[in-house]
Amino acid sequence: MRIDMGDQLPTEAVSRHITNDTQFMFQFYKPCFQFYAPSPRIDEHMSPHRLQQSLIIALRSCPLLLGRFVVHTDQTILHSYDPQNPNLPTLEFQSTELTFSELVEQAFAYSVCQRHNMDLTIPDGAIRRSNDEQPMLMVKVTYLRDGGVVMFAMTNHVAFDGNAMFSFLAYWAQCNAGHGVELPVDLQPVSNKILTDADQTSDTSTDTAQSPAEISVDATRSPAEIATTITRAVSRDTMVPCVYSISTQNLRKLKQRVEASGELQEGEWVSSNNVLTALVAQCVARANMRAHVYEHGPWNVFQALDMRRPLGLPLRGLGSPIILAECNASADHVLHPDHLPALARSVRMSVDTYTPEYLRNAMHWMHTTYAGLARNGVDEPWRHFWFSALNTNRRCVGVSCMNRIPIYDADFGAGRPVMARSFNPRPNYVIVFPGPPGETDAYDSLHLYVTLERPAMDALRADPEWSSMCTLVSEF
């Protein structure tokens, strides 16, 4: 069923330009399952009628989830709200004979949920001139035979990144539980501008703006040709997605090892995410080279950086202004575990270069380049940009540390989810989510979503450094 908002929609809301930052480069839907253990409170608090009514309340406070993409004549893209928009969020319900206990036995595998039709077909998410049939939000609720619930949700990443998506789900849950909460400030439908108004209308030549190494653009080839050039030709059947776990205790030990190594100079420091990126980069690069998936040689290592943090913007706001902070690592630095402290330091130093001034200059370059393509008649200029580090023909490995997203905060009144599962289709790009809540309600592990070609995954599992730090939670 589609959510019938009737006359309950606000008459207007602030629309949002999405060509001010890098969010138009994330044209896909991000899916996630949340698993709720059987509880006598589920019948009351998570009934179809109650979930539908509370979702209507939540959507009224966040109307851009009832929006659609509009491509203007100057080729800029607006995430636009219209109370008459036919592109409404969807909410579906079903029941299954599968039990929560069976899901536990199968480690909450994503593929098990798929086999029992607990998911929804994932659209490609591409920006087009008419997207009326691609809702910004899709939800499916499955009631298990023994009283548990599985909730599948996805939003279009161009509009809502993971932080915003799970913040909204937690807000919906609070509305459902009857707490009478207001929408968090950082989810208010306002435009979080990275560029100034002058930058947005600038006619400045791209020659006066510095071209960032992290972002590539090519107007001489078609989007299909670009996709072929930057995508390694492998069969989908050879790709192996897995979920691994690393305990926060192991991560602390790893960080202490870096701090005690003598590699850091006076006044220097590394974060846990820098250390985790270094570990992942070493192990994944080693696995790829030992399995002969990639030739022996240096690697580009990156850590995804949310530009909202250095720019002082709400961290869970609309959009996905991400940049990939890159550094170079020699083959020696990724092959030998003893070099992990040096690699962690390189990752930290790379992240530190992304000052507010650098980011604004990079976004100014991208904006003026985008405008230049549009003026020169390039159709759909948003399909001509890509992150250099995501070229799978290159030796690149990186991490997106999303360990702060509120993935386990959605308590609809019957308890928080006890497990969550997503899917990462990108090889060599590891996504990090918080693990399930521990005894103190704080997570005591991180879940790493790793996708590699089969020979590389076999080599990763055999890597003693990886095995000493990480355990396999689930295969796809």
Image (cartoon, rainbow, N blue to C red):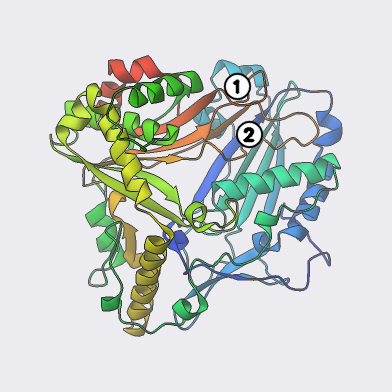
Q: Is residue 443 above or below residue 126?
A: above
Q: Residues within 10 Å of mark 2 (few under 14, many from 20)?
A: many
- Give the residue at x 52% y 31%: 110
Dividing the picture into quarters, in which one does residue 298 lie?
top left
Q: Is residue 378 visible?
A: no
- Which residue extends farthest front? 266
Mark earlier in primary sequence (1, 2):
2
Secondary structure under the numbered disc 2 in the rendered image:
strand
Image-based side of 299 in relation to 197, left or right: left
Q: Position of residue 108 (x, y in %)?
A: 56, 25
Type of amino acid under label 2: Gln
Given residues 454 and 286, the one toward you in this image is 286
Mark-to-mark CA distance, 1 and 2: 12 Å
Dividing the picture into quarters, in which one does residue 440 lie?
top right
Q: Position of residue 403 (x, y in %)?
A: 52, 36
Image-based side of 256 in relation to 285, left or right: right
Q: Position of residue 434 (x, y in %)?
A: 54, 32
- Give the residue at x 15% y 30%: 332
Dividing the picture into quarters, in which one does residue 266 lie?
top left
Q: Residues within 10 Å of mark 1 (few under 14, many from 20)?
A: some
- Which residue extends farthest left? 296
Secondary structure under the numbered disc 1 in the rendered image:
helix
Quadrant position of the C terminus in the picture:
top left
According to the image, label 1 marks what residue?
103
According to the image, label 2 marks what residue?
34
Type of amino acid under label 1: Leu
- Give the residue at x 63% y 34%: 34
